[in-house]
Image (cartoon, rainbow, N blue to C red):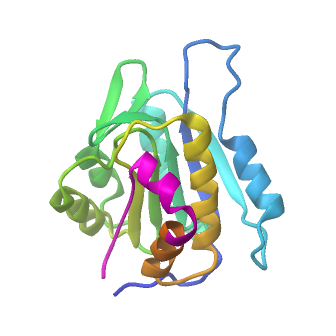
């Protein structure tokens, strides 16, 4: 069983545009700032947040997230629209999990990859296991169902808080189910890790 190098895990977030309306200011950045300043872990949960609206930007940011200077950012949080096995990274541009795995090939060791998107985890278990092996990730997580922005963002932050408390992934999953099981079931929260 793989375990995280430390309990403390900063967050590297890549967020898509939620609408085509430039007046829409919806963003998970505010939630990340709240977590940074209000986490009950011993250290502040730092984050880096970048918006992305094209495949090229997405690919560049994914590669950047794997640079040595971001080793302490062991949660890679991708907040986008999505559907089964895909992220929507731009206008009419989707990225399949297989493409994302190729971009991260072997460079996501000790990282928890979280998809804050509708249905991205709604694929066969063997595909998710393959993604985890190919990237070298410690764990992958996200949602199997269509989700609403507000409740899923709340669960994301609660999940990230539990990630600060443990090095063993089964303990993180246990606490999410124990304390927020109803919400996790409603949203189709799913977590895959080596047992």
Residue at (50%, 27%) from the top-left corner? 53
Residue at (59%, 43%) from the top-left corner? 151
Task: Indicate whether 20 appears above or below 93.
Answer: above
Residue 112 in percent (x, y) is at 46, 66
- Residue 182 belongs to the span the image colors magenta: yes
Viewer-proximal residue, 180 or 120?
180
Number of disc labels = 0
The quarter of the rendered structure image containing the N terminus is bottom left
Q: Tell me where residue 191 sits by quadrant.
A: bottom left
Residue 189 in percent (x, y) is at 42, 55
Viewer-proximal residue, 46 or 25?
25
Chain part drawn in magenta: 178-195
Q: Tell me where residue 128 sits by quadrant.
A: bottom left
The quarter of the rendered structure image containing the C terminus is bottom left
**In the shown orientation, is residue 186 left or right of residue 71?**
left
- Residue 155 belongs to the span the image colors magenta: no
Residue at (17%, 54%) from the top-left corner? 124
């Amino acid at each position: 069983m793989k375990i995280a190098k430390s309990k403390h895990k900063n967050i590297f977030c890549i967020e898509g545009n939620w609408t085509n309306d430039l007046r829409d200011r919806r963003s998970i950045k505010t939630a990340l700032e709240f977590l940074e300043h209000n986490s009950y872990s011993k250290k502040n949960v730092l984050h880096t947040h970048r918006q992305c609206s094209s495949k090229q930007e997405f690919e560049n940011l994914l590669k950047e997230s794997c640079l040595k200077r971001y080793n302490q950012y062991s949660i890679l949080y991708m907040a986008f629209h999505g559907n089964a096995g895909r992220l929507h990274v731009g206008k009419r541009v989707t990225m399949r999990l297989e493409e994302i795995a190729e971009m991260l090939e072997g460079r996501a060791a000790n990282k928890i990859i979280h998809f804050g998107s509708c249905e991205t985890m709604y694929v066969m278990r063997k595909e998710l296991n393959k993604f985890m092996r190919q990237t070298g990730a410690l764990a992958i997580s996200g949602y199997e169902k269509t989700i609403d922005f507000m409740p899923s963002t709340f669960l994301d932050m609660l999940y990230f808080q539990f990630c600060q408390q443990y090095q063993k992934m089964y303990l993180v999953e246990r606490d999410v189910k124990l304390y927020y099981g109803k919400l996790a079931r409603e949203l189709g929260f799913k977590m895959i890790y080596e047992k």
